[in-house]
Image: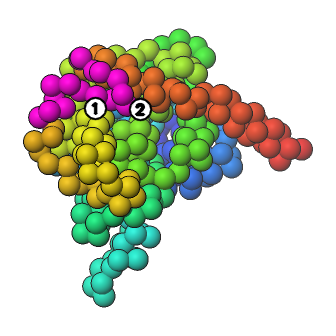
Amino acid sequence: MDRDSHIQPGDRSPHLFPDAFYTAPLDVWATAIQRVPSEAEKCLIEQVVHYKALSDMEHEFLVVHACHPSGSKVVLGVDRNADVLTAAQQHAGPTETAGPSSPLVSSARYLSTLMRFGPSPPSPEAYDSVQVSHDATPAPILAQHGPSVPLSTVSFSRAPRPSLLHLSVLLLTIRTHFPSYALLQYQCYFFARATCLALVDISGGIEVQHEEGQRAATWRGVHVSLYSAGRAALQNMLLLPLAEFPVLIVPAGLFAVYSAVKLYDGNVVESEVDRRRISDEKIREHAIPPKYHAAWQIFVRDSATVRK
C-alpha cells in the first residue's frame, strides 16, 4: 500500500518518510529524529541486513527495515566511509577537491592518498551516513552501491522490538566512541558488524548467516585480518616503526604464506567459522551494549527535562 494513504503529509517526518531519496551525515539524521522522537519511537525494526558490495573496494553497509503502526514501511541505509576531506586538503593540488561522496569514491580516494603519500596519515574522522528510501524499498539504497550480496540478517520477531529511536542512539554511541576511520580496524565492516552484534546482544535479535557471509571484511578478496597479519609480519621483519610503514606495500607472496596459517591477532584461524567467532569476540571486547545503555539513559533524562 502507498504510505501516503496511511500518514497524512503534514504528519510525515522528512527524515523517515521523504518525498525524494534522502541522505545525510549520521549525526544530522539522528539529531533530527531525536528532536521529535515520537515518530521514530513508533517505527519498530523488523530486520537489519548486512550487505557487501561486489565492487573492487568491497564496501559493507546495512539496510534497516522498519514498520510504522499505520503499516507504512521505512527503509534505511547505514554505512561508514573514510572522510578524506582533511587528508586530501592537506595534500591536494590546485585542481583537486575532496569530500565524502559515494562509498566507492570515498574509499578509493582514501586508499589512493595512502599509496601516494607513503607513511600513513593520521586516521581521518569517519564519515558515517544514513540514507532513507523514498519508496519504502531497499532498491534506491542498493543502487547507490551497485551489485551487492547479503552477508547476514538480524531479525526481531518478538516484543519488545527496538525502534529507530533506539537505533539512532546506538549508532551515535558507536560513532562517539569510535569516530576515526582505520582501514584495518574501524572501517565499514567494523561499523556494520558492531551495530548488528549490539542489536543481537541488547534486543535479542536472531541472526542468520547467509552463504556469502565468508566475504565479510575482505578487501580485494583478502580478509582484512589476514592483511593486517601480513603487514605486521613484514613490519617486524624490516624492523620499521608502524607510523613509518606504508599500509599498502605487503607483497602478494606474503598473503600465500598466511593463507596456509591464517593469523588473526595472534590466533590461529582454521576455518571461516573460527574467523567470524574471533572477530566477533574482538568487537564485543569494546563493550558497546553498556555504552549504549548509558547513552540511552542520558537521552531519556534529557528528553524528560526538555518536556518539563
Q: Foreground: 140 or 199? A: 199
The stretch drawn in magenta includes residue 257? yes
Left or right: 37 with respect to 161? right
Residue 198, above or below 135: above
According to the picture, the residue beneath numbered tag 1 turns out to be 216
Question: Do the residues bearing badges 2 and 1 touch, measured as CB atoms within 8 Å?
Answer: yes
Amino acid on which disc 1 is placed: Ala
Residue 91, above or below 80: below
Judged from the image, the secondary structure of the residue bearing numbered disc 1 is loop
Region rendered in magenta: 256-271
Query: According to the image, what is the colour scheme of the structure?
Result: rainbow
Q: Foreground: 66 or 12? A: 66
Residue 96, above or below 55: below
Left or right: 306 with respect to 218? right
Q: Quadrant of residue 40?
A: top right
Q: Residue at x 36, y 38 (%)?
A: 189
Q: Quadrant of residue 82?
A: bottom left
According to the picture, the residue beneath numbered tag 2 turns out to be 193
x then y, percent, for residue 54: 18, 41
| Residue 289 is at least partly visible in this image | yes
Looking at the rendered structure, which numbered label has been put on residue 34? none
Left or right: 75 with respect to 102? right
